[in-house]
Amino acid sequence: MAKPYSQAWHQTVNAVAGEEFPLILLEITHDDLVTPIRIVNDRQELTHNGTLFQGFPFLLALPEDPESGLPEATLQIDNVGRELVDWLEIADWNKPVYARIIQVMRSAPDTAEWEITTNLRNISMDSRVVTATLGFENLLGLPGVSMVYNPITAVGLF
């Protein structure tokens, strides 16, 4: 069962001119990172459960519910800091990269209204923006067994 949103969240989202708005926290983790990249989609920093998230606006397009396939979100971060770009250039991409997305209200930053951890894939960058896809591996599309007996793999049976 899904976690219900708080009453304060509902009032803020449904207000015509609310005093605050929901914030998105993004935490990127990878084995090559000494400390995870932690940013909040705002111009001010925010502390969530004792962890500081730097204010850094980014675009996060949440996924639609597709007819077929797995839903994927799109993340775009401005390419303005060397820290992110330096890591992208030296990272071992054979290791998984994870993105944890948390939605909070500034008035209650320790209360996670919504949270999910996904794989960060298809990372690319140019001089203006770093783009990535957020989603899960298609585990349902993988074969159920590691060895299939057919005329190519088991010639003696056929």
Image (spheres, rainbow, N blue to C red):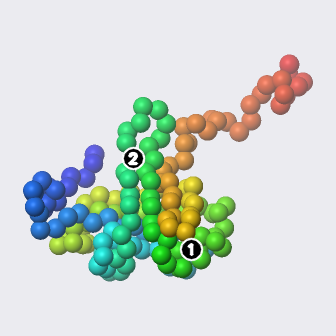
Residue 88: image location, x then y, percent: 59, 70
Of the residues shown, which amino acid type is indicated by label 2?
Pro
State the image coordinates of residue 3 (x, y, percent, origin top left).
Answer: 25, 52
Identify residue for label 1: 85
Query: Which residue bears the numbered disc 2?
Result: 63
Q: Tag 2, which secondary structure?
A: loop
Distance from disc 2 to disc 1, alpha carbons, whole Å, reads 26 Å
Residue 48, disc: none
In contact (CB < 8 Å): disc 2 and disc 1: no
26 on left or right of 11: right
Q: Quadrant of the C terminus?
A: top right
Left or right of 67 in this view: 113: left
**146, 70: nearer the viewer:** 70
Q: Residue at x 58, y 36 (%)?
A: 141
Which quadrant would residue 100 be assigned to in this image? bottom left
Neighbour tally class for label 1: few under 14, some 14-19, many 20 plus, Cα within 10 Å: some
Q: Amino acid at mark 1?
A: Val
Residue appearing at x 83%, y 23% in the figure: 151
- In x, y percent, where is residue 22? 23, 63
